């Protein structure tokens, strides 16, 4: 009845209905009706994109052990390669997200209820590597290469560090997760830690020098340095008088 007497009724009939950010926040349970952030909304705010949504959902589930969740976080950025023939949206964390967020689609945040880069299977690989770092060769196959595993480890440790550095919040399970994340960050090493960045510049310089004769051999003119040019001019006597 209110709408029928509204002076904006004709305009409203032709207005395109779109999901506003406020509607998304309400639909995902991030804010109360009066706009106050919920506990889920506060945890969500500590992360980028939709990565905080699975964390918040898992913390709300009291039956989800923190010592399992801390490994399942590896799935958030893993992509589909680790799932093999299984559903990339599977795993306990993925199934929980689909149920809590009702398989919602929000570009940049959720796809079918899970984060955009979510991929099941990475958590099992990460858990195996933490237990035995020498087992990497046993985990590769035709679809899953060493580079995929190393990237998953880097991304997982990045999420853990983010949690460690995130603000404190009066929620016991969040505090437990931060402690568990710190323990694993201290216990594990990034695959990139073996790369000595200080040696890269000299190596690149030597590589460039070794390429110079090859370039000249192909008929490419290599410009002389200022010192070489000055020396040549001095020897030829063509320098400025």
Image (cartoon, grey):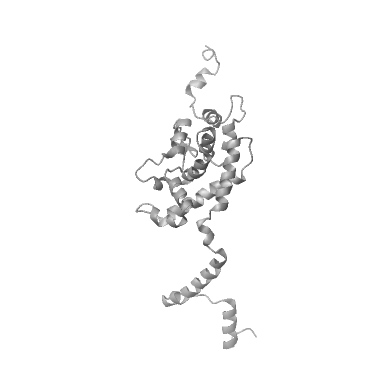
- Hey, which quadrant is residue 230 in on the image? bottom right
Q: Residue furthest front?
A: 131
Task: Tell me which residue sits at (59%, 77%) in the image.
Answer: 226
Foreground residue, 115 or 164? 164
Image location of residue 192, percent across then percent down: 52, 58
Give the x, y percent position of residue 138: 39, 55
Q: How many marks?
A: 0
Q: Position of residue 85 (x, y in %)?
A: 34, 44
Q: Nearer the viewer, residue 228 or 64?
A: 64
Q: Is residue 103 left or right of residue 198?
A: left
Q: Residue at x 56, y 29 (%)?
A: 22
Determine whether 224 is above or below 63 in the image: below
Residue 101 in view here: no
| Figure quadrant of the C terminus | bottom right
- The residue positioned 59% from the left and 44% from the top of the image is 179
The reply, left or right, for residue 128 in relation to residue 184 is: left
């Amino acid at each position: 009845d209110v709408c029928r007497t509204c002076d904006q009724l004709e305009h409203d009939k032709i207005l395109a209905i779109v999901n506003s950010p406020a509607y998304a926040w309400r639909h995902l349970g991030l804010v109360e009706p009066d706009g106050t952030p919920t506990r889920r909304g506060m945890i969500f705010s500590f992360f980028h994109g939709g990565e905080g949504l699975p964390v918040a959902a898992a913390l709300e589930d009291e039956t989800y052990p923190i010592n399992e969740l801390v490994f399942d976080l590896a799935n958030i950025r893993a992509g589909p390669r680790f799932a093999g023939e299984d559903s990339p949206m599977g795993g306990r964390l993925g199934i929980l997200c689909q149920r809590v967020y009702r398989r919602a689609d929000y570009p940049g945040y959720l796809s079918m209820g899970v984060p955009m880069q979510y991929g099941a299977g990475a958590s099992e690989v990460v858990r195996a590597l933490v237990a035995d770092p020498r087992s990497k060769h046993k985990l590769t196959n035709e679809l899953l290469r060493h580079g995929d595993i190393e990237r998953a480890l880097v991304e997982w440790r990045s999420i853990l560090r983010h949690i460690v550095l995130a603000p404190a919040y009066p929620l016991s399970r969040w505090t437990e997760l931060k402690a568990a994340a710190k323990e694993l960050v201290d216990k594990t090493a990034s695959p990139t830690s073996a790369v000595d960045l200080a040696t890269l510049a000299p190596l690149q310089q030597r590589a460039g020098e070794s390429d110079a004769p090859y370039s000249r051999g192909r008929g490419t003119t290599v410009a002389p340095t200022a010192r070489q040019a000055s020396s040549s001019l001095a020897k030829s006597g063509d320098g400025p008088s």
